[in-house]
Amino acid sequence: MSVVHVPSRPTFETPITRLFGIDYPIIQGAMAWLSEGELVAAVSNEGGLGVLGASIMSVDEFEVQVVRAKQLTDRPFAVNFPLVLGEYSAHLEMALSHGVKIIFMSAGSPKVLTPRIKEAGALCVHVVPNLKLAQSAIKHGVDAIVLESVEAGGHVSIDGASAITNIPHVARGIEVPLIAAGGIVDGYGMAAAMCLGADGIQMGTRFLATKESNAPAIYQKLLLEAGEGDVPVFSKKYHPSRALRSPFVEQVLALEAADRPVEEVRTLVGRGRAKKAAHEGNLQEGVFYAGTGAALVKDVLSVKELFDQLLAEYQEATGRAGGFLKAARPTESDAETTRARGGK
Ligand SMILES: Cc1cc2nc3c(=O)[nH]c(=O)nc-3n(C[C@H](O)[C@H](O)[C@H](O)COP(=O)(O)O)c2cc1C
């Protein structure tokens, strides 16, 4: 009989695992039209936290996803509303009525929904790009912060810092648990973020290349084939976003390179392009959001395989860094000091 090797997973306890009641400090970031019931439940079932994204869905459309996730997992999962789009108050009431206890808010002011979320006894998390906005969200009572650095897929802050300076800067300036997002696609990135001061990580792009993701084949193909420089920020002066190169992104980049008026870009972006990519795989018109980590993603795994791999890489990365420390052994100068002290 052949023996199947199952890698043993490490156990974790961080402010994020305690806050959400999860096993691993790994959050699947909300992705408009892509983080639907199957993916979210698969992540929560593996011991992370899945997050459903409402984006501009109608309340009825979004309720289908909440009900689906509830059917597929009895573990905690969260919902996300960008506070500049759609019917977020109605989305919130619907989610609360289904017993959702963790709400991620992005864009817009945390003032708007935080009081209602707290009154309902749920946790609220706000997604921000920098320390200033993190501190403002905390002032309004949020329980945790997601810090999205400039490497992230989707909408980004054009003057945002890269994770290596952003994470320690924010970690030192706030008291609530910190989740780092942007450019993390493996256990090495996860370990780096945790070393820099994060209590957990959020990934979007990596989860697009999973079997449970509903990203169409063309989306996964673009992602797997992406190399260095293939995930630019476009629409820099209107609504800066990071996405895989596609005919539409090239068109906007060409307008920007020619210094065309921002109105020309404004008339092109939006128009349901994220949905066209996510649901239809429309290469010509769609926007295929992804982060810079796309260049490191080379396979489509199941969520379970991804968790096994991430956790093994995390252990390897922390072991590797620790391995550079010289073993404590007496040096020549220690020996001289000992002699100078009379051999004691
Ligand atoms: C396809 C896609 C769609 C996204 N949609 C949303 C969204 O609806 N709401 C939100 O708060 N963040 C959204 N994000 C950001 C993710 O939640 C996450 O923070 C980000 O992907 C992290 O960076 P990474 O892609 O480098 O892992 C999206 C990201 C991607 C790649």
Image: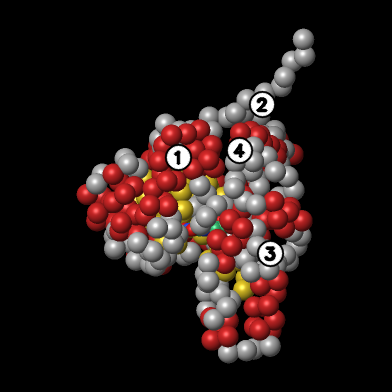
Amino acid of disc 3: Leu
Amino acid of disc 1: Ala
Q: Nearer the viewer, mark 2 or mark 4?
A: 4
Q: Tag 1's secondary structure?
A: helix
Mark positioned earlier in the residue sequence (4 or 1):
1
Q: Tag 2's secondary structure?
A: loop
Q: Residue 326 placed where, x, y %?
A: 70, 39
How far apart are the two marked residues, 2 and 4, measured between alpha carbons?
15 Å
Which disc is residue 303 wearing?
4
**Label 2 neighbourhood size at 10 Å, few (<14), some (14-19), many (20+)?**
few
Residue ID at (42%, 52%): 61
Residue ID at (58%, 85%): 264
Which color scheme is applied?
secondary structure
**Label 3 neighbourhood size at 10 Å, few (<14), some (14-19), many (20+)?**
some
Q: Residue 113 placed where, x, y %?
A: 29, 58
Which disc is residue 54 wearing?
none
Q: Nearer the viewer, mark 3 or mark 1?
A: 3
Q: Nearer the viewer, mark 4 or mark 3?
A: 3
Q: Which residue is mark 3?
A: 283
